[in-house]
Amino acid sequence: MRLILVRHGQTQWNVERRFQGGGSDIELNEVGHRQARAVGEAMRAEKIDAIYSSPLSRARDTAQQIAQHHDMRVTLEPDFTEIDAGDLEGFHFGQLPQEHPAFWKQWREGTGSIACPGGESLGDVMERAWAALVRIRDHHPEDTVVVVCHTFTVIALFLRALNMAPGLFRRLRLEVGSFTVIDLNGDQSRLVKFNDTCHWKEV
């Protein structure tokens, strides 16, 4: 299966650098809508067999921009929603070192197993998102599948597909409106593209 992982377009919380987890259904802003349209245009010529999305509007609206070029229905998958940020939902990232110093230290230096206070860890996201992807792969073993979701969901799936340690998430930068392509063939996964943003450089 060829997997195309898409991060949704920009929201106001992205601009404000707020922790935007699964508990906040923040809509795309004007730039985000343009990015979503650019992603759709970039994938117009792709042979796509199925499109799945997180149910949150920022991902769902991005997915619809892809689907409209292929006359396809977007299937919503709750297990592709963003990390549950718990008590950190809506926090400005600049506040975290002062407000949650122990968490922040582990988040930046640990193995990736630390959970957001009252929420999930990256490992939790990886477990649920990968289980959903395995179900999809069973239905589309030879197909090209698009999954539109969120920063930590994309990163969790990326790390799991390539058998990389969760703690390596800190070395990855994923832009809004970007897409990542991975070929999944049994236990042999091959990275084709990562964090591709060429389609929206002018938006």
Image: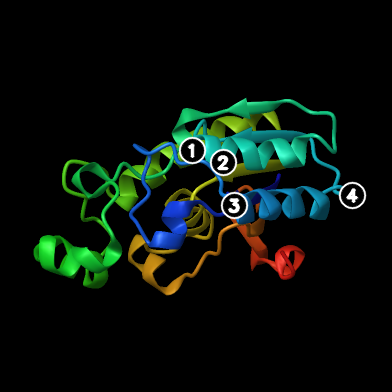
Name above or below for residue 14 compared with residue 76: below
- Which residue lies under the disc numbered 2? 59
Q: Are marks 1 and 2 in contact (CB under 8 Å)?
A: yes
What's the amino acid at mark 2? Answer: Ala
Name the element at disc 1.
helix
Horizontally, residue 11 falls left or right of residue 102, namely: right
Q: Residues within 10 Å of mark 3 (few under 14, many from 20)?
A: many
As helix, strand or loop, the secondary structure at mark 4 comes to loop
Amino acid type assigned to the residue bearing label 1 in the image: Phe
Label 2 vs 4, first from the N-terminus = 4
Q: Residues within 10 Å of mark 4 (few under 14, many from 20)?
A: few
For marks 1 and 2, the one nearer the N-term is: 2
| Contact (Cβ within 8 Å) of mark 2 with mark 3 | no
Reply above or below: 82 against 110.
above
Q: At 40% across and 46% down in the image, what residue appears?
A: 126
Screen quadrant of the N terminus: top right
Label 3 secondary element: loop
Identify residue for label 3: 9
Please tell me the numbered disc located at residue 80.
Answer: 1
Q: Amino acid at mark 3?
A: Gly
Foreground mark, 2 or 4, reads 2
Per the image, the residue denoted by label 4 is: 45
